[in-house]
């Protein structure tokens, strides 16, 4: 039973997926901390003072029988704050991925030339076209 479970983990890449989820959560925490603790205070200097995330446009205010006041409002400060957080976190993730993930270099292909008869691309060292059997000049 244990051998079967081990085979399941290795053959279905379930273990690799689990490790990816765990590492992804840890990276998410690092990115969130970087954005909230390092970048947002600097960005906060550029934004208006006060608790701007609590800004709202009140549509209706109602008072019930017990005297409790309730509001119906558009919370545009919260929306703008969430939007700024998203942009900052997305930018930080972009920078991390750009720094850590390097593109795979593709080896250059064999030199090719065009057949003068059929215009098929053939290796430069070929003496005869593979498509139309025409003789190729060297």
Image (cartoon, rainbow, N blue to C red):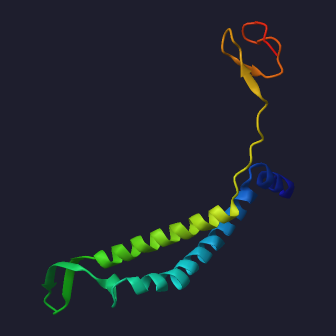
Image quadrant for the N terminus?
A: bottom right
Which residue is painted at 53% across and 78% down in the image? 35
Side of 75 relative to 118 (left or right): left
Front in this rendered view, residue 121 or 55: 121
Front in this rendered view, residue 43 or 76: 43
Side of 49 relative to 57 (left or right): right
In the displayed orientation, state which residue is furthest to the right.
3
Above or below residue 93? Residue 16 is above
In the image, residue 82 lies at what x, y percent? 40, 73
Which residue is painted at 69% across and 12% down in the image? 116
Side of 124 relative to 30 (left or right): right
Q: Image quarter for residue 24?
A: bottom right
Above or below residue 99? Residue 130 is above
Front in this rendered view, residue 27 or 38: 38
Above or below residue 15? Residue 29 is below
Which residue is painted at 34% across and 77% down in the image? 78
Side of 62 relative to 6 (left or right): left
How many numbered tags mark residues here?
0
In the image, residue 27 lies at what x, y percent? 64, 71
In the image, residue 58 lies at what x, y percent? 19, 79
Image quadrant for the C terminus?
A: top right
In the displayed orientation, state which residue is furthest to the front.
138
């Amino acid at each position: 039973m244990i051998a079967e479970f081990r085979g399941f983990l290795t053959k279905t890449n379930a273990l690799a997926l689990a490790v990816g989820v765990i590492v992804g959560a840890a990276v998410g925490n690092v990115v969130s901390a970087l954005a909230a603790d390092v970048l947002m205070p600097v960005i906060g200097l550029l934004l208006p003072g006060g608790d701007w995330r609590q800004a709202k446009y009140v549509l209706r205010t109602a008072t019930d029988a017990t005297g409790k006041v309730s509001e119906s409002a558009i919370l545009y400060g919260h929306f703008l704050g969430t939007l700024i957080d998203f942009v900052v976190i997305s930018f930080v993730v972009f920078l991390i991925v750009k720094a850590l993930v390097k593109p795979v270099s593709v080896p250059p292909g064999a030199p090719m030339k065009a057949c003068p008869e059929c215009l098929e691309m053939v290796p430069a060292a070929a003496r005869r076209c593979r498509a139309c059997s025409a003789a190729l000049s060297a």
